Amino acid sequence: MGAAGRDFHNFNIVYRDDPETRVVAFTAAQIPGISDRVYPPSLSGVLYPDGVPIVDESKLESLIARESIDNVVFAYSDLPHVEVMHRASRVLAAGADFTLLGPHVTQIRADVPVIAVSAVRTGVGKSQTARYLAKRLRARGVRLAVLRHPMPYGDLASEAVQRFASAADLASARCTVEEREEYEPHIAEGSIVFAGVDYAEIVRSAEKEADIILWDGGNNDFPFLVPDLHIVLTDSLRPGHETMYHPGEACLRMADIVVIAKTDVASPKDVQAVVATVLATNATTTIVRAASPVRLDKPELVSGKTVAVVEDGPTITHGGMATGAGFVAARQGNAKAILDPRPYVVRSIAATLLDYPHIGPVLPAMGYGEAQLSDLEATLAAMPVDAVVLATPARIERLIAINQPVVRATYEYADAGTPTLGELVDRFLDHQMEKIR
């Protein structure tokens, strides 16, 4: 029971080769267009020569009844604890048991050291933190492989093991905007990114090229690999969320280092509230304070102008943020107005805003397929603005036509106190480099 990613991984590691278990189906939710497919025979193994069906989660109860299901394995990330238990209640009422699989049975042990970046929520700042770490590792002369949390939205058989080293690789794989948001910045800075569906094989491939693996997590999931150093981000703009979401709280409790992110824009009271919760939950961790400064590449096109803002998609959809870095950058850039897109949205973009009514006067960078990209293009074309501020890391201006001037909003990791993340990682590297040599 999942959303294309963790569920496939749990199957591959725990159930695929288990002759005492018969997996009847995956249920799918959250991501458009991923149900009514088949997890292919090339991935499902010899026990499943016809593959495994993927059905919509709305059919869960009828599936349990029809197939006499004994057990439903929960494999989502970033759901409130109460929503996890609502799903458990559906399963129990339908006559099956409800299972959560933990790191001890689902994590892969690599033959090289692993640094993992996780979070308590989606949209905390994992990506820029992972890029900061990658840059620091490369500066130390470390051969690095970045492993991204899975986003297998296309042809699953062809996505078993993916390696991205150039923009051409992204185009060849027909990556969605959501995939590009995560892969493009790493590639642009010189890292090789591995992703896909079968993480045992992905790890084996990455080990051939790397001294260290950097796990760049998705949502608030715990790492697929056993980490030698586990860095977990919290959000000082969302105090209290540290222990409200699954499996984010588990990540917090496992963390070697906890980063309190966005301290440059949060109130001191909220920062201290997050620190207090972290220490009450994981008293042995080391706390780092961090900032996430945003910059406009063409601020003159924003100052005194009316603009549209396009944010990172997951951050403001299931991540729950009303706005993101683009909104902050536009306000800091003295925009005259940030135009609410609602009067102009069409088709799938309109549906997304209805599905996520908490979203503020911004657009999510939705692009799971050509139809969504087309709808985003049409929406922006209809908006009477002087410029479009793009805060998605993906270069969507290369994928759709944007008639107005484009201003990119970028955000990077920055230390905001001591100890610094760099100092702590350097200590880890000093110890690991002896092993690597």
Image (spheres, rainbow, N blue to C red):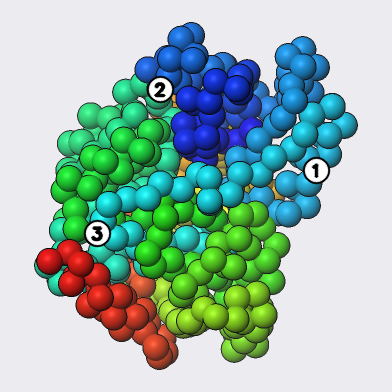
Residue position for label 3: 212
Per the rendering, the mark at residue 86 is 1
Does residue 124 appear anywhere in the picture?
Answer: no
Residue at 66%, 35% in the rendered image: 73
Of mark 2 and mark 1, the one earlier in the sequence is: 2
203 and 300: which is toward the camera: 203
Helix, strand, or loop for circle 3?
strand
Residue at figure coordinates x 46%, y 75% from the top left:
257
Query: Residue 234 location in percent, x, y?
Result: 54, 70
- The amino acid beneath tag 1 is His
What residue would you read off at disc 2? Answer: 43
Q: Quadrant of the N terminus?
A: top right
Q: What amino acid type should be assigned to the residue bearing mark 3?
A: Ile
In the displayed structure image, the side of residue 43 where residue 187 appears, left or right: left
What is the number of the mark on residue 33? Answer: none
Label 1 or label 3, whichever comes before in sequence order: 1
**How far is disc 2 from disc 1 in space, using C-alphas?**
31 Å
Pointer 2: residues within 10 angstroms few (<14), some, or many (20+)? many
Q: Are marks 2 and 1 in contact (CB under 8 Å)?
A: no
